[in-house]
């Protein structure tokens, strides 16, 4: 069941749709309104109804209307409904009357009683009204009582379209299956079964495909056909199918077929018949030649020629001929036919050179059969007889070696030899001859005799022993009749040359000579092919820990290439300090291998040893805000020079090449070279300095050496001449500061000769204490200035001020203060 609410409704009166007069739909004549007739049209969703109608039919229908107080609404009255067409209705939202034609009737009118009173009225209506709309004949339902005043009624409409509802109960349709749209045979002329194919069939509504029924009809002329005969039923639910079917049993007759679709709804809903668009004809037999002739009539080793003519096809064209022979010793009693060949030939005649018996005293006849395109054979046509006498053996017609360039043995093959008449093959004699230029040949030399009775053969032979030379061969056939009836010699149509070796590359290099990543590039050039093209290169490698004692070569890679030069990347040893060398050989297409060429040696890079740091000692302190770092390079195992790098705290690396001003000995340094790095001014406090060395070529880094140190603030009290009295505490501060600096430079602290105690140490000994302090300073200066060969960051020579007697003077103390702060 489906319901359809009206999508528009309006009353027509006197040539207009009166949306401006009333919202209601009316029928009949309202006398006070000039006795004009009213017609009420109701439109529904046509698309939905018609889409459903395509596969379903209405079993019942009703319409719901809401009666209003119009006419004699208190009494039951008759409504007359039509299905028809109305055009030009105002839109449901419009309140304007517009001109329009009265709805036209498509169906007869159907009258129904509407009960008295206002309100909802459910009216069962004829399904013929729905059929008219569903089929597309009508676009609406309308009520029309013509000139009746008695049946004048009105119903709610435009003011509320939901109060006009059409209800339809639908049932699915059952329709016939459709016949195939295409039906044809795979061939129109046949000797055997052909394929009948059909497609484009379809099931009906409520009627799925269940099978196909096939019949056939025969004809002698493809025009006048016999009655249809049942053939078979093919069970399938597919919309297409095929069946192997036979042509007529009578040669030359035609057969056509027809197919119809059968469905699950039964015979009443089978499709119509679809007749095949073509027919198949049963092939007819071709005619044999009218004449067949064999020549010469008497032969020994001559070529036999068989000729024929007068053959013809029938319904199928000539495709070819079967040739057969039979033999006899008396020209009367014959052997069975022996098929010699099937010739592909469409002409009505032809010729053929058959192989025949070479046994003296043998008669031979030939039979020829015509074959048509459908492989139907005619009867045979027999030739005249021919007769064989004794003859010499026939020499091979072909003789060649399997390769014209070889490193090893090749195969000498021959074929086309023949028995003589009364002279059966027993063996073949083989000889050879050599040449330096493939032009001037040496004498023939006996090689071997191969025993066989066949007409062809082969033997394994070798090329010349001298590389670059050529060798040819000759063969003759030997038979039972003896040497007088041996064949002539057949010389090989080609020669075999002994391969010459390729010349290995004239240049073979490995780069880089010192590598960091394990990839080495091998490059070679100058290869010269021998007589055979280049097939591949074989590369091997050997390793050494010292560059002197080498491992045996081991296979590394094979490179398929015919070029005379090339490059290839290989993975070298990952072991630091390991030497590797390579060798290369060339293989030609005959797998001959050249001598080897050895590359230069490459070495896996070894990073430098960590530098030796004399100062600062980790955890020690200095008072110098531009401290010196005393560095000695370690050993670079590969013999490269080194770059010294220094990084303070989280700053940038500073190196001896790019920042020579910061190093006493700068640039690229050798092994065990000392240099002093003087830092830019640093803040008082704790610092970290990191040292490393890089090798010059690869710039691989040594192990980093990290030292922490502290820059202390000056510990000295200002001593003013003639004001400050030098006391024991001043001397003690100097001693402490000096031992701190000595530790910074990895020097032993001074064991002072005498403890200074305030109020107890006598003034007369103070000059000796100052001298002792000066000696300690001299020790540091000597170590620093003697550390390297450069004076760039040396401490300037000191000219000590006179000490005098008693307490040291202010200038003596200040000189010591200044020196300690710059150590």
Image (tube, helix red, strand yellow):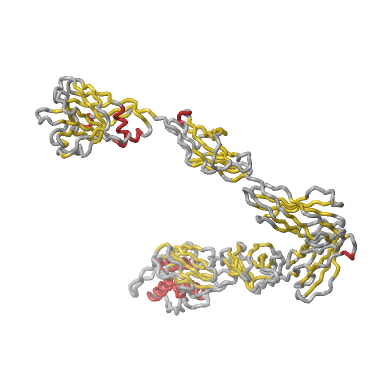
* Whole-percent x, y for residue 447 in the image: 85, 66
Which quadrant would residue 120 be assigned to in this image?
top left
Where, by quadrant of the figure, is residue 472 drawn?
A: bottom right
In the image, residue 313 above or below residue 665:
above
Count of numbered badges drawn on the protein: 0
Q: Position of residue 646 (x, y in %)?
A: 47, 67
Q: In this view, does 364 lie above or below 36?
A: below
Q: Is residue 771 left or right of residue 123?
A: right
- Is residue 146 something one can see in this rendering? yes
Q: Is residue 751 visible?
A: no
Left or right, residue 584 beside residue 196? right
Quadrant the N terminus occupies: top left
At 65% from the left and 72% from the top, the residue drawn is 527
Depth check: 795 or 465 in front? 465
Q: In this view, does 54 lie above or below 397?
A: above
Q: Quadrant of residue 627?
A: bottom left
Q: In this view, does 227 lie to the left or right of 416?
A: left
> In this view of the protein, which residue sits in the foreground, 118 or 800?
118
Which quadrant of the rendered structure holds the C terminus? bottom left
Image x and y of residue 591, in percent = 71, 64
């Amino acid at each position: 069941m489906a319901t359809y609410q009206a999508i528009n409704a309006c009353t027509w009166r006197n040539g207009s749709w009166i949306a401006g007069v009333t919202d209601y739909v009316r029928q009949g004549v309202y006398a006070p309104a000039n006795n004009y007739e009213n017609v009420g049209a109701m439109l529904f969703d046509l698309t939905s109804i018609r889409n459903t109608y395509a596969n379903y039919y209405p079993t019942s229908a009703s319409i719901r209307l809401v009666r209003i107080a119009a006419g004699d609404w208190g009494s039951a009255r008759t409504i007359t409904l039509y299905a028809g067409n109305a055009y030009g209705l105002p839109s449901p939202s419009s309140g304007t009357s517009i001109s329009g034609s009265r709805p036209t009737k498509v169906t007869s009118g159907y009258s129904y009683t509407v009960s008295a009173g206002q309100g909802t009225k459910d009216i069962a209506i004829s399904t013929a009204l729905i059929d008219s709309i569903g089929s597309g004949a009508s676009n609406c339902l309308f009520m029309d009582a013509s000139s009746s005043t008695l049946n004048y009624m009105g119903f709610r409409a435009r003011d509320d379209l939901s109060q006009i509802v059409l209800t339809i109960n639908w049932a699915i349709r059952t329709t016939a299956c459709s016949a195939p749209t295409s039906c044809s045979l795979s061939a129109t002329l046949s000797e055997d079964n052909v394929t009948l194919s059909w497609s484009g069939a379809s099931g009906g509504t409520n009627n799925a495909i269940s099978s196909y029924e096939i019949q056939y009809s025969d004809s002698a002329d493809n025009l006048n056909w016999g009655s249809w005969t049942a053939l078979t039923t093919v069970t399938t639910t597919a919309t297409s199918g095929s069946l192997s079917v036979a042509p007529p049993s009578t040669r030359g007759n035609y057969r056509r077929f027809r197919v119809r679709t059968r469905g699950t709804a039964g015979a009443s809903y089978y499709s119509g018949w679809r007749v095949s668009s073509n027919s198949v004809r049963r092939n007819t037999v071709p005619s044999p030649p009218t004449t067949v002739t064999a020549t010469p009539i008497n032969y020994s080793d001559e070529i036999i020629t068989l000729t024929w003519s007068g053959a013809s096809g029938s319904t199928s064209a000539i495709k070819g001929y079967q040739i057969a022979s039979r033999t006899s010793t008396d020209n009367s009693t014959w052997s069975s036919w022996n098929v010699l060949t099937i010739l592909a030939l469409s002409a009505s005649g032809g010729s053929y050179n058959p192989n025949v018996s070479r046994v003296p005293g043998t008669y031979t006849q030939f039979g020829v059969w015509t074959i048509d395109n459908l492989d139907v054979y005619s009867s045979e046509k027999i030739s005249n007889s021919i007769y064989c006498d004794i003859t010499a053996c026939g020499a091979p017609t072909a003789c060649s070696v399997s390769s014209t360039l070889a490193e090893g043995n090749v195969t000498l093959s021959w074929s086309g030899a023949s028995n003589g008449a009364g002279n059966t093959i027993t063996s073949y004699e083989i000889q050879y001859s050599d040449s330096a230029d493939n032009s001037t040949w040496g004498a023939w030399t006996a090689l071997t005799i191969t025993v066989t009775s066949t007409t062809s053969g082969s033997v394994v032979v070798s090329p010349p022993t001298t590389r670059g030379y050529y060798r040819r061969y000759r063969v003759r056939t030997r038979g039972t009749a003896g040497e007088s009836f041996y064949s002539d010699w057949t010389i090989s149509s080609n020669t075999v040359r002994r391969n010459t070796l390729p010349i290995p590359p004239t240049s073979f290099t490995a780069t880089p000579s010192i590598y960091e990543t394990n990839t080495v590039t091998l490059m070679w050039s100058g290869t010269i092919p021998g007589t055979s093209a280049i097939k591949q290169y074989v590369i091997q490698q050997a390793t050494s820990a010292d560059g002197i004692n080498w491992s045996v070569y081991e296979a590394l890679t094979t490179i398929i290439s015919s070029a005379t030069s090339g490059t290839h990347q290989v993975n070298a040893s990952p072991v630091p300090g390991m030497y590797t060398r390579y060798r290369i050989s060339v293989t030609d297409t005959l797998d001959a291998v050249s001598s080897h060429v050895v590359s230069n040696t490459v070495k896996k890079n070894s990073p430098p040893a960590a530098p030796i740091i004399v100062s600062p000692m980790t955890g020690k302190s200095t008072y110098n805000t531009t401290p010196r770092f005393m560095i000695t390079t370690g050993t670079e195992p590969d013999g490269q020079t080194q770059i010294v790098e220094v990084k303070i705290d989280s700053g940038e690396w500073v190196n001896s090449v790019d920042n020579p001003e910061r190093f006493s000995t700068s640039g690229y340094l050798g092994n065990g070279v000392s240099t002093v790095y003087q830092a830019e001014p640093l803040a008082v406090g704790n610092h970290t300095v990191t040292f490393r060395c890089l090798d010059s070529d690869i710039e691989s880094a040594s192990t980093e050496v990290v030292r922490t140190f502290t820059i202390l603030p000056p510990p000295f009290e200002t001593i003013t001449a003639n004001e400050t009295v030098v006391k024991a505490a001043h001397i003690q501060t100097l001693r402490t500061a000096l031992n701190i600096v000595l530790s910074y430079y990895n020097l032993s602290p001074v064991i002072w000769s005498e403890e200074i105690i305030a109020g107890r140490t006598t003034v007369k000994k103070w000059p000796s204490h100052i001298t002792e302090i000066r000696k300690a300073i001299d020790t540091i200066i000597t170590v620093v200035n003697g550390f390297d060969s450069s004076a760039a960051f040396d401490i300037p020579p000191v000219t000590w001020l006179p000490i005098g007697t008693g307490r040291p003077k202010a200038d003596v103390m200040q000189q010591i203060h200044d020196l300690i702060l710059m150590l």
